[in-house]
Image: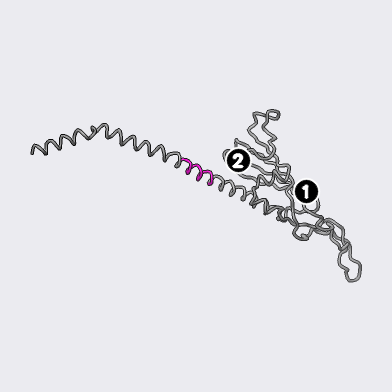
Amino acid sequence: MKQRIIELEEQLVSQPPPAKRARKAAAAADDDYTESAPAAAATAAASSSKADEKKIKIQMKKIFDRLKKEAKSDTCKFQGSPKHVKVDEVLEVSEFEALFGGKGVLIQPTPQNKPKSVVTIIEFQTQAQIEELFGSDLSKQLPIKGNYWSRGGIPVRAPFRFGGFGGNTMSKSVKQGAIDVRISHIEVNYSKNNMKCTLKFTLNQIGGGGCGYDSDY
């Protein structure tokens, strides 16, 4: 019995007090957190960055698809002169900055032009600037497609009528076929007050696309 008492006393002497053991455990936990926290933060930041990049690509593709649809519509008749297509979007300030910030040429606000304005105007004046805006994936789809139309309002012979000669009538604009269309200029207007973003595209057909008139005169 006496020997057992001596063994217990030696065990108590060799063990640190509870408070000291708790401090050691806490210190070990802090060391583990210090090592794992930066790695976890880096992983979270990378995931967030990829998500933001994907969101930007989706938003820009939405704008690009609307532009392609408008360029091929019957209201956008390419007949040799530039055409203008407008696309409107509602964007948060953070979304606008992610899409257009640091790109193109800032027209307003600048220290020289309406520095306090809540309306931002950015122009994309070169093909390099336009391709940077759309990104590599969408830029591979350039040039976009449009339709060439003959010019209407040209006098043409009316069909021969029995018992007399046919008179003249005016020709109608007729779709001639698909053509390649180049984006030559983009103007972006954004209002922080109503979060409305308007993109104004200037489009030019590539090549002549035809004579531009009906051939039955």
Amino acid type of the residue tagged 2 in the rendering: Phe
Magenta run includes residue 46 = yes
Question: At which x and y percent is residue 103?
Answer: 66, 40
What residue appears at the point 31 percent right and 36 percent down from the top-left corner?
Answer: 25
Q: Which residue is mark 1?
A: 82
Which colour scheme appears in the figure?
Answer: one colour
Question: At which x and y percent is residue 106?
Answer: 68, 36
What residue appears at the point 58 percent right and 46 percent down from the top-left corner?
Answer: 56
Question: Which one is in front, 14 or 34?
Answer: 14
Question: At which x and y percent is residue 78?
Answer: 77, 53
Name which of mark 1 and mark 2 comes first in the sequence: 1
Q: Which residue is mark 2?
A: 96
Magenta stretch prevailing secondary structure: helix
| Side of 96 where 166 appears, left or right | right
| Side of 115 where 49 appears, left or right | left
State the extent of the magenta-drawn residues as a range.
Answer: 41-50
Quarter of the figure that contains the C terminus: bottom right
Quadrant of res 13: top left
Quarter of the figure that contains the N terminus: top left
**Residue at disc 2, secondary structure:** helix
Q: Is residue 214 above or below residue 98?
A: below
| Side of 213 where 106 appears, left or right | left
| Side of 215 where 148 appears, left or right | left
Kindly give the residue lying farthest to the front in the view shown.
3
Q: CA distance from mark 1 to mark 2?
A: 27 Å
Q: Is residue 50 above or below residue 151?
A: above
Magenta run includes residue 11 = no
Amino acid type of the residue tagged 1 in the rendering: Pro
**Residue at disc 1, secondary structure:** loop
Q: Which dot, 1 or 2, sits closer to the camera?
A: 2
